[in-house]
Amino acid sequence: MPLRHFSAALVLLACMLATGRAQELTTTTEFGITITPDNITDAIQETQEFWTPVLRHIASDDFAVADADMRKQVVGFFNRLHEALFKQLFEGDDTDARDLLDYLCLRMRKMELYRQLRSTLNNDKALVAMMDRWERNHREIHLLPADQRADRVKAMLALMPEQMQSLGISADVSEKAFRLWTLQSQCMSRMYKTKAGAIIGNFEKEARRMDRPVGELLRKIASSADWAMISKSAGKSASRPEFEKAWKQLAELRQQQLAATPAAASPR
């Protein structure tokens, strides 16, 4: 689930502080995005400051979209994920720690690519519609055997120009955005190839086996968390208010898109 970076970041931060590995952080560039040691430590701090109050909110009666039992299942899901990543790090070796660091940096690049797509498209309704389909397809593809994934990702990517056109994106803008979708597909494929990504893939399988309302709630929470990170003001850290704002915005954008589709139109 896209909430995975919360657990990974907490564990990674604990590791660096406990073992003095912070000096091992280096500046890297991949998929056209450079990440510095300061970017990494800032992202870890932001993640802590964002998710601690957000998860408390989700567990509380204030999160009125779900009853107590469903909220308990959702919070329990994330706790188990956290424990699995914690176990990988503290029962593993330096290779496992570097794997988590690699995963976190890829996660940061994924969010930055979505920010660039948002700026390029300048159409939040279209972007959210594409992100919903993109994320769902990637989850399904990475449930397949590893040797079947690359061709499916290529096929999904090939459909993006047509999808953008159907959502009213001009050919010129679509061409620019397609380059970013291509980088995003490469970035997300790399994420799934990490050991941490494999652990998360197992939790995605678990989420699919849960009762549908619980699974849907997990995805809505995850996408709202992502949108809070993507749509936040430059130079500002995301917080619980951003999460609540993102939750509301996504609901509105999805409803607007649904109303705009031919299937949703009222019969004449």
Image: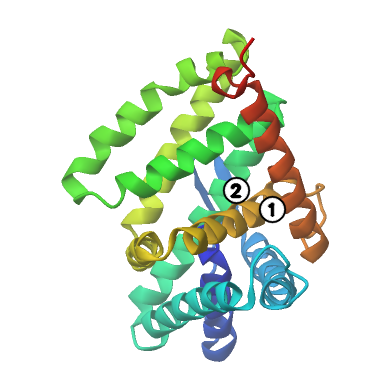
Q: Left or right: where does residue 232 sit relative to residue 69?
A: right
| Residue 61 position (above or below residue 217) | below
- Judge whether residue 74 can be spotted in this image: yes
The kind of residue on which mark 1 rests is Met
Please tell me whether residue 152 is drawn above or below residue 215 in the rendered image.
Answer: above
- Circle count: 2
Q: Nearer the viewer, residue 109 or 214?
A: 214
Circle nearer the N terminus (1, 2):
2
**Residue 54 position in % (x across, y down):** 71, 70
Q: Residue flagged by tag 2: what amino acid is it?
A: Met
- Residue pushed farthest front? 268
Residue 266 picture location, percent across and down:
64, 19
Name which residue lies at 53% across and 40% down. Answer: 132
Mark number for residue 229?
1
Q: 10 Å neighbourhood of mark 2: few (<14), some, or many (≥20)?
A: some
> Residue 95 got which mark?
none
Question: Does the CB distance between marks 1 and 2 fall below 8 Å?
Answer: yes
Residue sitting nearer the eye, 65 or 239? 65
State the image coordinates of residue 265 (x, y, percent, origin top left): 63, 19
Residue at x-position 64% and y-position 72%: 67
Q: How is the image coloured?
A: rainbow
Q: Identify the residue shown where x is 68% and y is 35%.
A: 255
**Is 61 on the left-hand or right-hand side of 205?**
right
Quarter occupied by residue 191: bottom left
Check disc 2 and report its element: helix, strand or loop: helix
Q: Residues within 10 Å of mark 1 (few under 14, many from 20)?
A: many
Residue 111: image tag: 2
- Please give the name of the residue rendered at 19% of the width and 42% of the height, measured from the top-left corner: 148
| Visible residue check, residue 1 | no
Residue 194, given in percent of the width and then of the height, sits at 35, 61
Q: Look at the picture and state if 42 lies above or below 75.
A: above
Report, in whole angstroms, how far the alpha carbon at label 1 lies from the one at label 2: 7 Å
